[in-house]
Image (tube, rainbow, N blue to C red):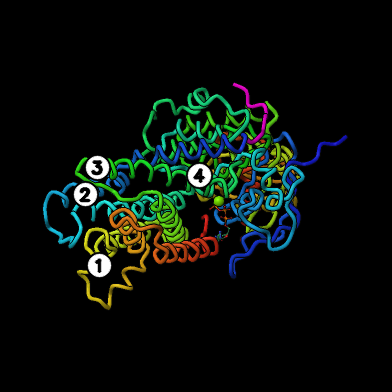
Amino acid sequence: MTYVPAPGAAPLTRMVAAQVLLEVRLLLRNGEQLLLTAVIPVVLLGLLTAVPVVDTGEYDRVDFLVPGILALSVMSTAFTSLAIATGYERRYGALKRLAASPLPRWALLAAKAVTVLVVEVLQVVLVGGLGLALGWRPDGAMAAVPLLLAGTAAFAGLGLLMAGTLRAEATLAAANLVYLLLLVLGGVVIPFGQFPDALRPVLESTPTGALAGGLRSVLADGDGLPWAPLVVLVIWAAAGTTAAARWFRWE
Amino acid sequence: MSVPPAVEVDGLVKRYGTTTAVDGLSVRVDSGAVTALLGPNGAGKTTTVETCEGFREPDTGRVRVLGLDPRRDSAELRPRVGVMLQEGAGLYPGAGARELLTHLGRLHRHPLDVDRLVERLGLGGTGRTPLRRLSGGQRQRVALAAALVGRPELVFLDEPTAGLDPHARHSTWDLIGELRGDGVSVVLTTHLIDEAEQLADHVVIIDHGRLVTEGSPEELTSGPGDDVISFGGPPRLDLSTLRAALPESADVREVTPGSYQVAGVVDPHLLATLTSWCATNDILAEGLQVGRRSLEDVYLELTRRSAR
Ligand SMILES: Nc1ncnc2c1ncn2[C@@H]1O[C@H](COP(=O)(O)OP(=O)(O)OP(=O)(O)O)[C@@H](O)[C@H]1O
Ligand SMILES: [Mg+2]
């Protein structure tokens, strides 16, 4: 075997594609991550549609649940799973080692973004497919796309901020805690109407609350693009990514 | 035309708070050679290497790698330089060895054949086992392979053999020899004196962030006064009469109980002085041997001196 030097970076598109493939593979292989991103959303949707534990007011149960579970899916991938995976990559020095490879940093971030979007597409197919099978009849759909994208950016910024500043174990704990809190409080499965009035504006301005509420008005109410939730998400996205860019530490 | 150096470190200073990790170090690494940074724990080896890799910024001083600035010209340098972090860090915990190496290979234009690389490093048996479950020595070898897979012209290996069993260590030594044979410039760090002696064309001994001495292993062990006579006898001999009989330029010490060493300008005269002292004191000098001081002797003496 020869080690005669033949240095050179691969073409950028090939590097990014390789990085996306690696990240998607690692994610789909990780049991805990799959639990968060696939099993919990599917089980919640199936269970809560079948069993009347939540009062969904004027909505059909499935019409109410699908938008909330989609918001949960986005949070699980773009926030929880991204934060935990990145936190451990940082702790094991994988981010540092990669910084010494030909892959530029922005390309690594781009690959992570594409990975999140790929997983989200799989989730939309899974959750949407199950919803349709359970009788979900969405009213509109295209207006959901900007909401999903803005929500993804908001969660990803916050997830990376956490992964790049806390220890890996702290990120693991905090990301799971936030996930759980927002699952309950973020309008995912419990309507905002069941919380005290004073609390509503707060819950609706969490990223999960804004995304779930926005998706619900598009998919269940058949409204056009709801500006208020979109603005909330864009503000979270701007704040999260700015803070992450400022404080993220690669080592 | 002279070949430009692979690495040039000039007056490098790097502080962490009140600790001065590197304190005015200047080192030149020849292209195509194996250079060993040798020094005790905390000497500043990793800091120096990581500054060359662009991970850390010098407080003062200048670092050039392949003629380029490791931070400003990072994009140009990264494809050309292979990096192995200390303790085999830098691996995706959930990936397998082959998977990781294949991936890193895809980031390069002409990667090595991963199957052969895996075989060469004795990692064939690790299969799809996630890297976090491999043994420390196996991870270390994956990290070494990761430094090579892109076919770099210069590699930085931070303690490439730490934690390896003797077979793996020798195999790594052979591999580094092959790299050199193929024209790859190698900078490695080590605490192991025999490793530096065996592998390196050029040894740089550093301590407290400063250069202690440098040269080829031969140069470091062949200065005047670098010869020794060693012999065995009963432990705790009274050496004062021998010391009195020896010329100014020589001295004797008990290295370990029952094992003695006379160091200095060794000539037949000195040997005769020693054996006649032995005869007078009825000592059968077991294993009497005249030889060159080992690099270990030089290293211990120099780093002890700088510790004071
Ligand atoms: N990130 C850091 N923050 C604070 N101090 C540091 C940091 N990195 C290194 N040091 C200090 O700088 C000094 C040199 O450390 P360095 O890691 O360069 O030594 P080394 O020669 O590689 O040691 P070893 O053989 O143990 O790996 C040590 O005193 C160490 O404690
Ligand atoms: Mg070190």
Q: Which residues are magenta?
A: A1-9
Whether labels 1 and 4 belong to a single chain: the reply is: yes
- Tag 4's secondary structure? helix
Quick one: label 3 or label 1, which is nearer the N terminus? 3
Amino acid at circle 2: Leu
Residue B257 appearing in the image:
no
At 43% across and 45% down in the image, what residue appears?
A117
Query: B39 or A215: nearer the eye?
Result: A215
Whether labels 3 and 2 belong to a single chain: the reply is: yes
At 48% across and 31% down in the image, what residue appears?
B168
Question: What's the chain of the residue with tag 1?
Answer: A
Question: What's the chain of the residue with tag 2?
Answer: A
- Which quadrant would the C terminus of chain B be assigned to in this image? bottom right
At 44% across and 55% down in the image, what residue appears?
A156
Quick one: label 3 or label 2, which is nearer the N terminus? 2
Quick one: label 4 or label 2, which is nearer the N terminus? 2
Q: State the residue position of label 2.
A: A45
The label nearer to you, 3 versus 1, is 3
Q: State the residue position of label 3.
A: A132
Q: State the residue position of label 4.
A: A111
Disc 3 packing (10 Å; few <14; some 14–19; many ≥20): some
Query: B28 or B263: nearer the eye?
Result: B28
